[in-house]
Image: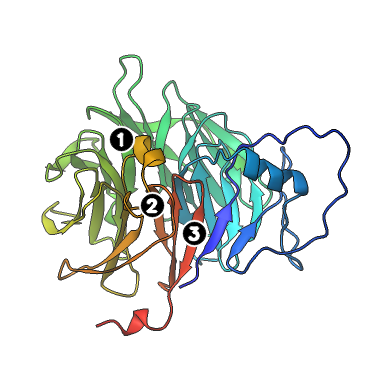
């Protein structure tokens, strides 16, 4: 398995030079690693399809002298799997081609860390939630932000309902205001989009890290800082079920393809499988490190866990000791199959390609790595 490295979420300032330097001869880096030229602010710039994207000489010196990568926070594939969206703490969501790692462009407009994103089923609309207290709606192709939902608190999680007619937005507790969920309508005509909130639901202690629409868009699943998974009724705004199986903060939730069950990732070093309707805990996957993300294969009975040592201590820890590899488990038997190394910091985000033949991981090191499975993986019994 040879991963493709995606690096575009760095913040670097080139060193001043005493004299101009001749532009370098365009060349491609070693196979498996792709670096990308910066995207000018104000628009979504497309990469040239007939040649690889290149970094300038200043960019190469910058990455060597100013290694300040911004951590990845969220990864999302579109429905077809040809586009890959990444969010990071550098304020700028980024769009990539998932097959070869070319960067298509960057969405400029947020002024804070971008925590989550979602894309419509037709891949025409991207929604993002940021710490700058806004949820923005973008035209995926042009990179234009056509509407901004403004709140008084930082926005954490965003998710489009099946059919793309509604959206749920979670806001963090701030200045005495508790965490809340807000449901808004998504207008078919973009010019008619409004900021009207259909219903708001509040109550949990601490922030809500993830919010997902349940089967038939009648319920919403949430998990957050208090370690409790809640099932909300969309019509009444009341809590139908609560699951307190986790002992620490819940970092991630991921639904199965048919939405009958979902998996949660927690800092208590476990991932758990739940029934989407009854909230019954079906399986528990124990890890030897805090789990930041957990995803399920769309074609096999496999799951992948990602996490690692706390980011506060990674500067004094090797990648092996920090346990920054992804772990593959059997979903049914709760047994570990193997691991995939590569990151130099905790893994914060995971996403499985819709065809099940690859997945992408995003880490604290600022890299998104696309891992393509070889044929031996599919022969595992």
Q: Is residue 324 left or right of residue 283?
A: right
Residue shown at 12%/42% (left/top)?
A: 244
What residue did someone put label 1 on?
208
Tell me if label 1 and label 2 are in contact, CB under 8 Å.
no
Q: Position of residue 307 (x, y in %)?
A: 32, 50
Q: Nearer the viewer, residue 306 or 352?
A: 306
Q: Residue 307, relative to residue 148: is it above or below?
A: below
- Mark 1, Cα crowd under 10 Å, few <14 / some 14-19 / many 20+, is many
Ranked by sequence position, the earlier of labels 3 and 2 is: 2
Instruction: Work out whether residue 219 can be spotted.
Output: yes
Work out how far the residue at label 3 is from the one at label 1, CA to CA, in angstroms: 27 Å
Q: Nearer the viewer, residue 22 or 167?
A: 22
Ranked by sequence position, the earlier of labels 3 and 1 is: 1
Q: Is residue 18 left or right of residue 129?
A: right
Q: Is residue 125 left or right of residue 308?
A: right
Indicate which label's residue lies in the foreground, 3 or 2.
2
Q: Nearer the viewer, residue 175 or 9?
A: 9
Indicate which label's residue lies in the foreground, 1 or 2.
2
């Amino acid at each position: 398995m040879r991963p493709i490295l995606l690096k575009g979420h760095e913040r670097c300032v080139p060193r001043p030079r005493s004299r101009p330097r001749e532009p370098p001869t365009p060349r491609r880096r070693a196979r498996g690693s792709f670096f990308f030229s910066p995207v000018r602010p104000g628009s979504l710039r497309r990469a040239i399809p007939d040649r690889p994207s290149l970094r300038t000489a200043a960019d190469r010196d910058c990455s060597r002298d100013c290694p300040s990568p911004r951590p990845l926070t969220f990864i999302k594939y579109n429905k077809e799997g040809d586009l890959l969206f990444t969010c990071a703490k550098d304020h700028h969501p980024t769009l990539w081609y998932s097959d070869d790692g070319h960067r298509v462009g960057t969405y400029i407009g947020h002024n804070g860390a971008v925590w989550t994103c979602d894309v419509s089923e037709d891949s025409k609309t991207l929604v993002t939630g940021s710490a700058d207290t806004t949820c923005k709606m973008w035209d995926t192709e042009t990179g234009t932000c056509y509407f901004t939902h403004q709140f008084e608190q930082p926005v954490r999680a965003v998710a489009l309902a099946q059919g793309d007619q509604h959206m749920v937005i979670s806001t963090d507790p701030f200045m005495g205001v508790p965490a809340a969920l807000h449901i808004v309508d998504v207008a078919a005509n973009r010019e008619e989009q409004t900021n009207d909130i259909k219903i708001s639901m509040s109550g949990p202690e601490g922030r809500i890290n993830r919010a997902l629409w349940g089967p038939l868009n009648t319920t919403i699943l949430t998990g957050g800082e208090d370690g409790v998974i809640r099932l909300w009724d969309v019509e009444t705004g009341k809590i139908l079920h609560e699951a307190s199986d986790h002992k620490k903060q819940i970092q991630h939730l991921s639904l199965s393809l048919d939405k009958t069950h979902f998996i949660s990732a927690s800092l208590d070093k476990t991932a758990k499988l739940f029934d989407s309707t009854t909230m019954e805990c079906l399986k528990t996957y124990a890890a030897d490190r805090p789990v930041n993300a957990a995803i399920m294969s769309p074609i096999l009975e496999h799951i992948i866990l990602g996490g690692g040592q706390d980011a506060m201590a990674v500067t004094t820890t090797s990648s092996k000791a920090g346990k920054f590899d992804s772990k593959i488990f059997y979903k049914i038997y709760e047994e570990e199959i193997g691991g995939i190394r590569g990151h130099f910091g905790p893994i914060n985000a995971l996403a499985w390609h819709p065809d099940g033949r690859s997945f992408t991981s995003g880490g604290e090191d600022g890299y998104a790595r696309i891992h393509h499975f070889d044929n031996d993986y599919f022969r595992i019994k």
